[in-house]
Amino acid sequence: MKPNLTQNKKWIFLLPLMAVLVFFASDAKAQDFVYQPINPAFGGSYLNYSWLLNSAQVQNTHEEKTPERATTDPLADFEGSLNRQILSQLSRNLMRNYFSEGFSEGQYNVGSYEIEVSPGANGLEVVILDTSTGDKTVVTVPYF
């Protein structure tokens, strides 16, 4: 009995097909995924700190600007401070006199400021003129 050649071809074709089916039909083996953080701030190993810091510094393209030295004039600072104190004292005295009976209107010269106090339609008008810059400020204190 001679083997049939067509039967051999069937087996040659079916054998790889059966091997593939047996492979896919077997139990799949795998392990669980385990996440381990890298960053020490989120529970990772503290040994990763220097590596993370170096990686961040290599990627950092931002250059910090170095602040220039303050070039303010101490004499100008003193003059500004003195002007603020004088104007503060003047406004306190003006308000104290405005609400008492010793109020007097008029014009005052304080440093580089000309201050004019006069009664207006809506209240007491205080006009402050800075003679060094020409700036003018008008403040109206309403009547009560």
Image: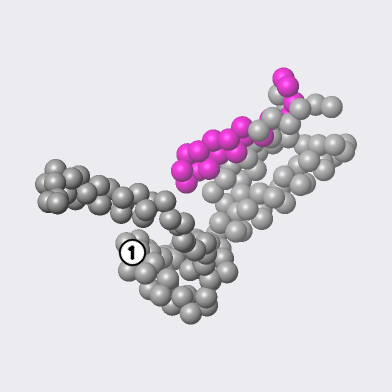
Residue 31 sits above or below residue 12 on the image: below
Q: In terms of image quadrants, where is residue 62?
A: bottom left
Query: Residue 76 placed where, x, y %?
Result: 49, 61
Residue 124 lies, with reference to residue 93, above or below; the image says above
Q: Is residue 17 above or below residue 120?
A: below
Is 128 contained in the magenta span?
Answer: yes
Give the residue at x 77% y 46%: 93
Residue drawn at (87%, 38%) of the image: 100
Which residue range is magenta in the image?
A: 121-138
Q: Residue furthest right?
A: 101
Give the position of the C terminus as an image quadrant.
Answer: top right
Q: Main secondary structure of the magenta part?
A: strand
Question: x and y percent of residue 92 in the render?
Answer: 76, 47
65 shown above or below 138? below
Foreground pick, 71 / 93: 71
**Residue in the foreground of this view, choosing between 41 and 110:** 41
Residue at 77% from the left image edge and 37% from the top image edge = 104
Question: Is 134 part of what is drawn in magenta?
Answer: yes
Q: Find numbered disc 1 in the image and state the secondary structure of the residue it sits on.
A: helix
Q: Position of residue 80 (x, y in %)?
A: 56, 56
The way the protein has been coloured in the rendering is one colour
The answer to whether residue 69 is left or right of residue 89 is left
**Residue 55 rendering spot, x and y as whole percentages:** 37, 69
Residue that badge 1 annotates: 59
Residue furthest out toward the front: 1
Residue density around tag 1, few if under 14, some if 14–19, many if 20 or more, within 10 Å: few
Q: Quadrant of residue 59?
A: bottom left
Residue 50 shown left or right of residue 18 in the figure? right
Residue 63 in view of the camera: no
Q: Is residue 79 left or right of residue 103?
A: left
Amino acid at circle 1:
Gln
- For the question of whether residue 11 can be seen, the reply is yes
